[in-house]
Structure formats: structure tokens, C-alpha cells
Image: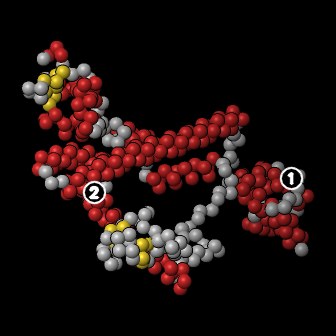
Amino acid sequence: MAKKDTYLALLRRGIDETTAMQLADSGIKIGDLKKIDKSQLVENYGLKADIADGVLEIISSGSKTHGKERYLSKVLAPERKQESKIEELKFKRQQKDVLSELAEQKERLKLARVESFRMQKLVMNRLGKTVELIVKLENNLHDEGKDDQKVKIRDQLETRGLEAARDHEMLDLEGTPQDIVDFRRNIVPKLILHACPECNEEMDPRSSRNPDDKENWSFICWECETDFLPGLASTVDEVMENGGRIVIDPDANPRNPVPPKPARQDFTTINELIKAELEETGADADTMTQVAEHSVLASGLMSIDDWIDQTLAAKGYIQAQEDREDFILRTGAGATKFNKWMKKAGLYFNKQTGRWSRWEDR
């Protein structure tokens, strides 16, 4: 009975089963263990040196909860070196520097994206203005009856087409600029204007509203005085009366998975979030900045003064028929401002040869 009591007492103090059984079988008691030393446990009871140290430490410290786990962690696991206060402060300083660097890199990435979007918007607006001019020229060419005026309009169309092709290539759009022009000139008016069902007269919806029927969206033809409802208005009325509208369920779950919020905003969590975002975009701030700097949208165009100096150094003169296309593509300036920039640069125009040159070279 004494062996069993000793065995259970050793287990309660956290000694492993093999060592507790070995000590209990040898007939030793808890009180005797407090009186012997390490050498006696090793020589008389066959324990290893590290296990003997652990047994004496546990016996001297008294009974504890979770003693078995504490014994295994103290005896079997290697001891961890205590970090100094200097090392701890150094690690916290490095952690703060890394967090600041990651925040700075994220801000730089945001600025690079904003700059790229701004340049694309500028080029898109310029392309839209060029398309509107091409549409106006093509409409005038279609209605023009004089041959000499058609020749002038075709020349203007050629220069505007070069400008549109340059901006279209910068934006990496699909198709051709002429596709945009055709859509704007041929398809859009058909979607906006209405035709009278009686006389087939084209009607502008802004000035063809029926003043006698203000409750409905009805039109009236001022030529034959025929009132009618357009097809779009009839379709909308049918949907409103018979149903079929899209219904949004406010309690529906999101279509895309929503990531859970982090439980804590520590160094590891923020670092993982930023790494995941950078891996998803496929580039860091340095790469985005470098791409924005070398992009044709931001820095691919020459200044007009540099282009004039380069052309004069190569040829000695500038001529509109020869250099207008290169001027448009390299500087991004409009074709109609070619002569204005030449005059602004202080060049001399020879009416006989049609060439621009400097005063000292004429």
C-alpha cells in the first residue's frame, strides 16, 4: 500500500509514470527524497542526472497543479535563454521601423495608382474631344458638295486621325479609333432621335414633347401633328404595370466572400495583410512607381522646344508636310497648333519654300 501511495504522490507532483514507478518500487518515500541528494539518486536508484535534478526540484517545490506537464517542460525540453532588456527594446524598435516602412510603401503604392489613373483620364478626355471633332468633320464631309472643301476636310481628318490613333494606342483599347467614331456618328443618333410613324420625320425628344399629355411620355410630330408613344416608354409602362422589375433582397448574403476583421492589429497581422494585398496586385510600390515613370502616358512625350531643337539639328529646317505627323506623335500637341508653336519658338517662315528655320540660318 505504501508503494502505491508513494507512486500516486509522485504523480501528483508532476513526475512521469516511469520515474515514479521506479522510485516507488525501490521503497523510497517522499520524506526520504527530501533528505537525499543527486548523487544518491543516480548511483543508488539508477536515474539519469537531468531526471534526478528534475525530481529534486519538484520535491523541494512542493505539490503543484499540472505538475506533470510542468515536469515535462522543465526536464525534457531544452532551456530557453532569457532575452535581455536591450534585445527586447531593439526588437521593438525594429518592429516599429518595419511597420513604418510598410505603411510608407502602401501610401506610395496608392499614390502611384492615383497618378496612373489621372494620366489615363487626361488621355481619355483628349481622345473624346478628338473623336467629337472627327464626327463633326465626317458629317460636314458627307453633306459637302464642293470638291475643294472636301479636300480640306480630308486633310483635317487625316491629322485628327493621327491624334486619335496616338491616344488610342496609349490607352491599349480594343478595336480602332474609327470604331468609336462610327458608333458616335451612326449608332448614337439612332438611339436618341425618334421617327414619326406617319411621315417618318426625325424628331428630337427635347423639343417634341406633347404639351396636351404631360402625364405620359408622349411625342407629337409638328409636321403632321401625329401624337404617339415611343417604344421605350411603352416598354417601361408595361414593366411598371405587369411587374418584372429587379427586386433587391436586403437580407441576402454578399456575392463575394467578405474576409473577417483581424482580431488584433499587431505587427504580424498588419504584415500579413499588406503582404497579401501586394501579392494580389502583383507589384510593390517601387515597381508601380517605376512603371508610372516610364509609362508613355506620363513621360513618353517630348517637350515642344526639345522637338524643335532636335529637328533643326538633324535637318536644318521644319516643314509642315514632312514633320506634322512626327510633331503630333512625339509632343502630344494638336495638329492645328503647329504653326502657333513654330511662331512661339521664334522661327522664321519662308513662304516660297514653306519651311520654318531660325533667323540666323535663313
Secondary structure under badge 2? helix
Q: Earlier in the sequence, mark 2 or mark 1?
A: 1
**Image vertical order of residue 309 relative to residue 236, above or below:** above
| Residue in the image at 12% along x and 26% along y | 351
User: 93 or 71, which is in the foreground?
Assistant: 93
Q: Nearer the viewer, residue 36 or 361?
A: 361
| Quadrant of the rendered image containing residue 221 | bottom left
Crowding near the residue tagged with mark 2, few <14, some 14–19, many ≥20 C-alpha atoms within 10 Å: many
Farthest-out residue, left = 352
- What sort of colour scheme is used for the picture? secondary structure
In the rendered image, which residue does mark 1 sit on? 61
Q: Residue at x 55, y 74 (%)?
A: 215
Q: Where is 168 relative to 107, above or below?
A: below
Query: Residue tagged by mark 2?
Result: 181
Where residue 44 appears, as percent x and y from the top left, is: 77, 57
**Residue 42 in view of the camera:** no
Q: Quadrant of the N terminus?
A: bottom right
Residue 302 falls left or right of residue 75? left
Residue 79's x, y, as percent?
69, 48
Q: Nearer the viewer, residue 155 or 51?
A: 155
Residue 96 vertical placement versus 272 (above, below) = above
| x then y, percent, for residue 134 | 26, 51
Q: Is residue 357 visible?
A: yes
Would residue 248 be found to the left or right of residue 125 on screen?
A: right
Q: Give the residue furthest to the right.
A: 31
**Mark 2 residue type:** Val
Left or right, 140 with respect to 55, comes to: left
